Amino acid sequence: MNIEEQLSLLFQRTFNEKPERVVRLPESGSNRLYFRIHGKSESVIGVYNNDRKENDAFLSFTRTFESLNLPVPAIIAEDREANCYILSNLGDQTLFSFLVSMRQDRSDFPDAVTDLYEQVLNVLPNFQINGGRAIDYSKCYPRNAFDRQSMLWDLNYFKYYFLKLAHVPFDEQLLEEDFQTFASFLLEADADFFMYRDFQSRNIMLVENRPCFIDYQGGRKGPLQYDVASLLYDAKADLPDGIREHLLGFYLEVLEQYIPGKRSDFLHYFPGFILIRILQALGAYGYRGFYEKKSHFLQSIPYALNNLQNLRKLWIEKRFGTELPTLFNLLDHLILDPGFLMQDGDTRNPNRSEAEPGEAKSETRTGAKRSSAEPNLKPRSLTVTINSFSYKKGIPADPSENGGGFVFDCRALPNPGRYDAYKQLTGKDQPVIDFLKQEPEVDLFLDHVTSLVDQSVSNYLERGFNHLMVNFGCTGGQHRSVYSAERLKEHLLENVEINVNLNHTNLP
């Protein structure tokens, strides 16, 4: 019995009906598989994960958080022998996708987004402190505390999957000594709390404009600072420094209500936890990008290095009780090398060698030899043009030399234009958005669309193609096609670093 059949059987046992559709959702950075399962009256999320210990951690933590009335998905059914379970459907809008849809440029951070981040940070201490008192830490996986071993795993992840795969030269013994010193410093911080571990904007769903939290199965006992660092220094969220300072101050005010007098101790260790979180993230990007060849993960590296640059300035200006000469010299090498950093929104090539295969090796400013076969982070200049259109006026012409692309017909979807309340509105207006979001056929349609487009985008990036066009058509080019085009734009900008041009050809 395959995974879809296992989940269908669990759905049928739970709701006494067979599912009408089981749609696999796009894969993320984990090995878990997610499905949206539609029945006549129910729409839920099915999860398959062959790591039973990780399943046990998630299910145990979720029940604890539910008992504390914390906003997490409800567990509807489970089949531990089949390694699957069913959760409530929280929709598809994350804090990150909302941020992407609202921002005009890197410096823009609308008040509505700030308000949501404040809501998130208002809930976080409840997870950390009240949740931390109630969690069964024996269920933690792979380790029940963010102890020295956990820290060294993260630091070596950075060493082996980022430094070595990007061919950055370093003295391994001296770096290991700094890792031990760094871990000793971090272990001085109070760590008797629940550490969510991957507390970032893609793991926060928005349900009726309120945050709901997912993917905490890697949680363990640990310090308060780590989760705040994870959220505020989330690489591709790219929060402006002023917003970070405001949100940190907001969190500390909330924390004061739980643990008075914690501010000074929190701030003393906070930069250290920012640093280890960024290094862990760089290791993850290297593993997924260099090792697994998933190139879109590499596009987060310049953002993470810009965060390191800002952090390094702070560490120079203030002393935080520890000296890490080899590690800091290594970070300075990465930060000061323009090939690694992002300038004016461009991703540069950290390997600095533009040689084609077969050409001679080049030298860096430090004299280290680099091979032309090394991984290249230079972005492909792929532009996806998305159009909404009316079939009455015809499919938009392709201005590139590629001769078209995808054309998706939205006329089989429920049509809000048939109702007087929506006739003067468009697919960009909230009432129309709400109407289409509640229709399972629309979810199914967009699930298939994003799967097809993702496949082409990945292939085009690997092959160095420059342009892909995607068209959505409906009767008037006003509601369904506009809504679908907007959702695809959000999906692409959330998941891959490319250029996206959106045109609504029948809107004023």
Image (tube, rainbow, N blue to C red):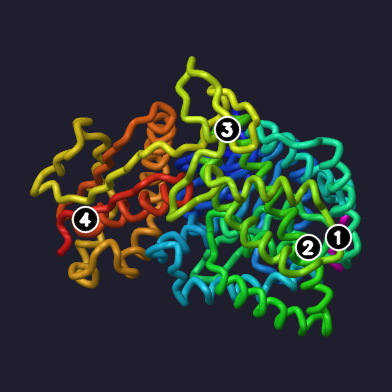
Q: Vertical placement of 271 versus 163: above or below?
A: below
View extreme (left): residue: 393
Q: Could you tell me which residue is drawn at 84 percent across and 45 percent down? A: 152
Tags 3 and 4 touching, CB below 8 Å: no
Q: CA distance from mark 1 to mark 2?
A: 37 Å
Where's residue 481, x and y in %?
Answer: 25, 52
Q: Quadrant of the N terminus?
A: top right
Q: Vertical placement of 236 versus 223: above or below?
A: above
- Local packing at callout 1 (Cα closer than 10 Å; few below 14, some 14-19, many 20+) is few
Q: Which residues are magenta?
A: 131-137
Q: CA distance from mark 1 to mark 3?
A: 55 Å
Q: Which mark is residue 5?
A: 3
The answer to which of marks 3 and 4 sits earlier in the sequence is 3
**Magenta stretch: includes residue 355:** no
Q: Vertical placement of 351 versus 189: above or below?
A: above
Report the amino acid beneath label 4: His
For discs 2 and 4, the disc positioned in front in the rendered view:
4
Q: Vertical placement of 28 versus 312: above or below?
A: above
- Local packing at callout 3 (Cα closer than 10 Å; few below 14, some 14-19, many 20+) is few
Dominant secondary-structure state across the stretch colored magenta: helix
The residue that disc 4 covers is 504
Where's residue 493, x and y in %?
Answer: 42, 51
The residue that disc 2 covers is 64
For discs 3 and 4, the disc positioned in front in the rendered view:
4
Tell me, yes or no, if residue 9 can be seen here: no
The residue that disc 1 covers is 322
Front-lying residue, 250 or 474: 250
